[in-house]
Image (tube, rainbow, N blue to C red):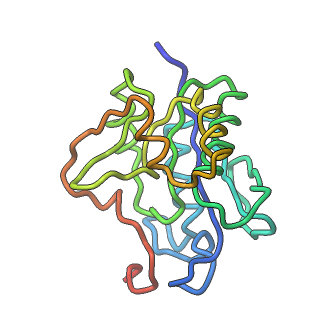
Amino acid sequence: MSSPLAGVVLAGGASRRMGRDKATVVFPGVDGDKTMVALVVAALAARCDPVFVIAAPGQRLPALPATILRDEIRGVGPLLATGRGLRAAADAGRDRAFVCAVDMPLMTPALIDTLAAHGGADVVLPWDGRDHYLAGIYRTALADRVDQLVATGERSMRALVDTVLTQRIVLPETSALTNVNSAADLR
């Protein structure tokens, strides 16, 4: 049996469409109003240990039950941050990590369980008509591959997923994969 999953939350920075940091937008949750990053960390912490939050340089975050790691460079896309999270998860002794974007405040432990049940691939992604690169399980050994891709100028998750063994799990539409990109999406 493989070791438990680590969790990696990509907190990013300011959203051009929202005009503010997505991570700190307050979202109504079942336990009261919480920031998006707190909701995502809570969902991951229910199934993942440890949980890492990859934050932009200088990004302010609330107190979280997670280890905060800072990107050295702002605005280079999710691939570099994912690599940093995968390396931290590997250093923590985990073989796999659930990587999630901070703008998925409806993420559920059940979705993580569904993906975690599949273990033969380097990457396991949910697919509901499209790939969800930032809601998937990644082998932590991919950190070196990420470094190679970043060194060649790659910035997108697709560059990684298209070059390793990837399994897509077909799912019906689920609110857990809702990506909040504007204030209107919060309603």
For this orientation, the residue located farthest to the left is 172
Residue most extreme to the front: 152
Measuring from the top left, give residue 186's x and y in whole percent. Answer: 41, 79
Q: Is residue 117 left or right of residue 138?
A: left
Identity of the residue drawn at 63% across and 64% down: 12
The residue nearer to you, when weighing 110 against 70, is 70
Asked where in the image residue 59 lies, by quadrant, the reply is bottom right
Q: Position of residue 55 (x, y in %)?
A: 70, 59
Q: Position of residue 73 (x, y in %)?
A: 76, 60
Going 49% across and 74% down the picture, which residue do you hit? 27
Q: Determine which quarter of the picture holds residue 84.
A: top right
Q: Looking at the picture, does residue 146 appear above or below residue 74?
A: above
From the viewer's perspective, tell me whether residue 116 is left or right of residue 7: left
Q: How many tags in the picture?
A: 0
The residue at the point 54 percent across, 67 percent down is 36
Q: Nearer the viewer, residue 31 or 66?
A: 66
Looking at the image, residue 129 lies above or below residue 89: below
Residue drawn 48% across the image and 46% down it: 159
User: As rendered, which of 68 and 165 lies closer to the eye?
Assistant: 165
Question: Residue 14's spot in the image, x, y percent?
Answer: 63, 76
